[in-house]
Amino acid sequence: MTQHLLLAAFALILASLAACGVDGAPTRPEPARETVPEPGVHISGEARFGVITQL
């Protein structure tokens, strides 16, 4: 029983260490760019229409 517990603990430690750095070295996020809207009228949105029936 102790061998199985020791083996399970070893496998857990090995799995956690193997997952470290999987996606590569850490990188800094790019600075946020401030967007200046162009002058003029901007219209955006979403519209849906339709018929729903149940049989």
Image (cartoon, helix red, strand yellow):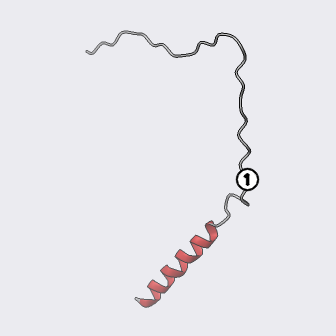
Residue placed most toward the observer, 37 or 10: 37
Q: Is residue 1 above or below residue 17?
A: below
The residue identified by callout 1 is 28
What is the secondary structure assignment of the residue under circle 1? loop
55 left or right of 35 in image: left
Q: Nearer the viewer, residue 26 or 33?
A: 33
Amino acid type of disc 1? Arg
Percent from the top left, x then y, of residue 26? Answer: 71, 59
Give the answer, above or below, for where 35 lies relative to 18.
above
Q: Quadrant of the N terminus?
A: bottom left
Q: Residue furthest bottom?
A: 2
Horizontal and vertical percent position of residue 38: 72, 17
Nearest the eye: 37 or 22: 37
Of all residues shown, which one is farthest toward the left?
55
Question: Residue at image x 70%, y 21%?
Answer: 37
The percent position of residue 12, horizontal first and vertical second, equals: 52, 75
The 10 Å Cα crowd at callout 1, few under 14, some 14 to 19, many 20 or more, is: few
Left or right: where 27 falls relative to 15? right
Please tell me which residue is depicted at 70% across the width and 40% down the height of the picture. 32
The residue sitting at 63% across, 70% down in the picture is 18
In the image shown, does 24 or 18 lie closer to the viewer?
Answer: 24
Based on the displayed image, in which of its 4 quarters is residue 41 positioned?
top right
Give the answer, above or below, for where 33 lies relative to 21: above
> What is the x, y in percent for residue 34?
71, 33
Q: Is residue 45 left or right of residue 20?
A: left
Which quarter of the picture shows residue 30? top right
Q: Which quadrant of the figure contains the C terminus?
A: top left
- What residue do we see at 64% from left, 67% from top? 20
Count the marks.
1
Q: Is residue 14 left or right of residue 47?
A: right
Residue 10, placed above or below residue 49? below
